[in-house]
Amino acid sequence: MKSNAEIRAWLADAVADQLQLAPASIDPDRPLSYYGLDSLAAATISGELTEWLGRDVAPEVLIDHPTINALAEHLAARVKEAPASTAKAGALPDDDPGWRGRAVRRVAGALVRVLSRLEIEGAERIPAEGPVLFAVNHLHILDALWMSAVLPARTRFLVAGEFRSRPVIGAVLTAARVIYIARGRADRTALDQAVDVLRGGGAVAIAPEGRLSRTGGLIKAHNGVAYLSCQSGVAVTPIALWGQERAVRSWLRFSRVRVSACVGNQVAPLARGATSQQLELHTTGIMRALAGALPVAYRGIYGDVLPQ
């Protein structure tokens, strides 16, 4: 078991590294929020703590014990902690969607064919096997319907947690083995589950914007996609989808909506242990690659760095 002093020294170094500060400048009795520690940095540090201590440390622990001294005292006093999460006995492999997942995919594919005309560019850029992390834009509540026709059947989608309790749709999403993630904070449980899928050779899809774009263009992205890439060592494959925002108008005219998909160039991962600032810059690079796969009108705030 690590001593209080060892944990305190480790935390000072980890916080300083994340925020690019000198360890000597960190006051162990000052709240970490004073130095700019955000929820994603807390998730990163808690993940590294879990590995270093050999037991699970949730990001909320950093919030509940806001100073280094308080956190070190709490961690040193906890002789017994729940072990780090492991796969459940009998769980499906990360690359196997299961019969329920395959059934959902077949129904989704049939709906796509009936309701739309889907054109895909760059499908050869989608890795046929091995771990792959997809970054997708978000224009319509039914984006996953078309994405399911583009992405490999083994892909696990990250979906907002509130959909779990929705009638019918919650059951469908659960059958499709989505990973539910909480909005508005760094959900370490969901992020760790996605990292485990990637490390197990599976495929994960995430919408970095975290919510629907009401403008039709890309909006500010969260750093979760960069975190997943960094922690798993997997490159990001951007996939842009557009046209589906006109679906209702087309369906009201009893016509199929024309939807286009474009697979962009992969973005290499950062080295593990990247700082919050590095993750922010990496997220911008991923979103620029996603913007590059979109027509000019859909590039939003990431369009100013690309040729018009």
Image: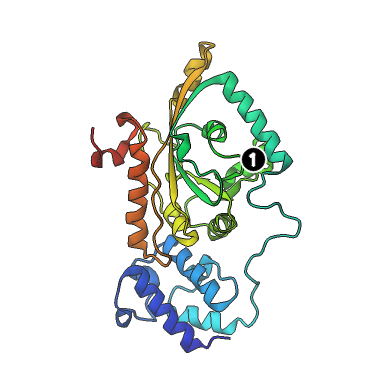
User: Given the image, on which type of amino acid does mark 1 rest?
Assistant: Leu
Looking at the image, which is closer to me, 285 or 252? 285
Name the residue: 49% across, 41% down.
126
Q: Is residue 70 above or below residue 141?
A: below
Q: State the residue at coordinates (35%, 43%).
A: 289
Can you give x and y, in whole percent of width and height, for residue 300 in the image? Answer: 31, 36
Residue 215 rendering spot, x and y as whole percentages: 36, 32
Give the residue at mark 1. Answer: 173
Which quadrant would the N terminus be assigned to in this image?
bottom right
**103 or 173, which lies in front?**
103
Q: Position of residue 303 (x, y in %)?
A: 28, 38
Q: How far across and how far down the image is residue 160, in percent?
A: 55, 45
Residue 237 against residue 193 in the figure, above or below: above
Counting every numbered tag in the picture gives 1
Name the image quarter holding the C terminus: top left
Q: Is residue 168 visible in this depiction of the protein?
A: no
Residue at left offset 32%, top offset 35%: 299
Question: Is 155 left or right of 289, judged from the image as shown?
Answer: right
Query: Which of the 4 image quarters holds residue 224?
Result: bottom left
Question: Where 163 sits versus 119, above or below?
Answer: below
Front in this rendered view, residue 214 or 289: 289
